[in-house]
Amino acid sequence: MSSIKCSAPDGWDYSDKPFNIGGYICLKFSVYWGLVCIALMRGIHPVIYDVIKLVPFVLGIILLVFFSAVFVCDVVITVITIKKLSHRLGIMDELAQKIHNVSDEIGSHVYEGVSAAAKKGEEFFNSEQLEELREKHKKELEELKEKYSSVTKENHFFQKRIIKAFPNMRSHRHSEQLDKLKAKFKK
């Protein structure tokens, strides 16, 4: 199951309106929507129905099949895209955590080296072991940053489309990474 959630627009809150139910609906806008629906059913729907009756039966079936196929393709592509986006965010999150861990390790080794050097009265930067650790961690950190950068730079058209279509989309597991992708796609 995907960890990405889409929410209603921020303005969809009727808590401050009288006769509301949980802030989701209120009497005033329910009446407005009812009037609009009546106008559509009595005024616009008959006109559309008359136009549809002009379309030959076979052409209508062909159009119905065509638009149904387009709809199904769109749903399938969207589901696949969201699954891939969730996977991508997971990879980005994992790489970011590894980068953080390596940075912590570097700091820990530097602290241990300085402490040991201070106890022995030696100069800190002459320690060969510390230099080897520093080089190892530096190389590992560069590799992780490069992997993270390449995953972030990947340009997935459909993922970009989903993120732009749902600007309030949230991820419970990878929110920081999703925010970084949103910022990248805004540019």
Image (cartoon, grey):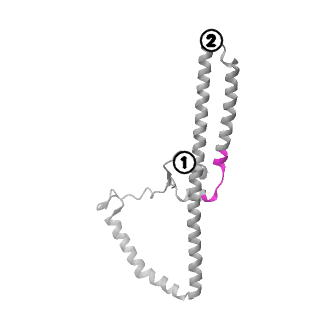
Q: Is residue 150 above or below residue 137?
A: below
Was residue 157 drawn as part of the magenta stretch in this picture?
A: yes
* Main secondary-structure element of the magenta-colored stretch: helix
Q: Callout 1, which amino acid?
A: Asp
Labels 1, 2: front one: 2
Residue located at (67% from left, 27% from top): 134
Q: Which residue is mark 1?
A: 179
Q: How many numbered marks have been drawn onto this rendered protein structure?
A: 2
Was residue 33 drawn as part of the magenta stretch in this picture?
A: no
Q: Position of residue 46 (x, y in %)?
A: 45, 84
The residue stretch that appears in magenta: 149-158
Label 2 Cα crowd, 10 Å radius (few <14 / some 14-19 / many 20+): few
Q: Callout 2, which amino acid?
A: Lys
Q: Position of residue 29 (x, y in %)?
A: 35, 66
Q: Is residue 19 above or below residue 149?
A: below
Q: Look at the numbered disc 2 and give the secondary structure of its residue.
A: helix
Residue located at (61% from left, 16% from top): 116
Residue located at (58% from left, 26% from top): 108
Label 1 Cα crowd, 10 Å radius (few <14 / some 14-19 / many 20+): some
Q: Is residue 52 left or right of residue 125?
A: left
Which of pointers 1 and 2 lies earlier in the amino acid sequence? 2
**Quadrant location of residue 31?**
bottom left
Q: Look at the numbered disc 1 and give the secondary structure of its residue.
A: helix
Q: Is residue 86 left or right of residue 32?
A: right
Q: Which residue is mark 2?
A: 120
Residue placed most toward the observer, 143 or 34: 143
Q: Position of residue 104 (x, y in %)?
A: 58, 31
Residue placed most toward the observer, 169 or 141: 141
Distance, label 1 to label 2, CA atoms, is: 47 Å
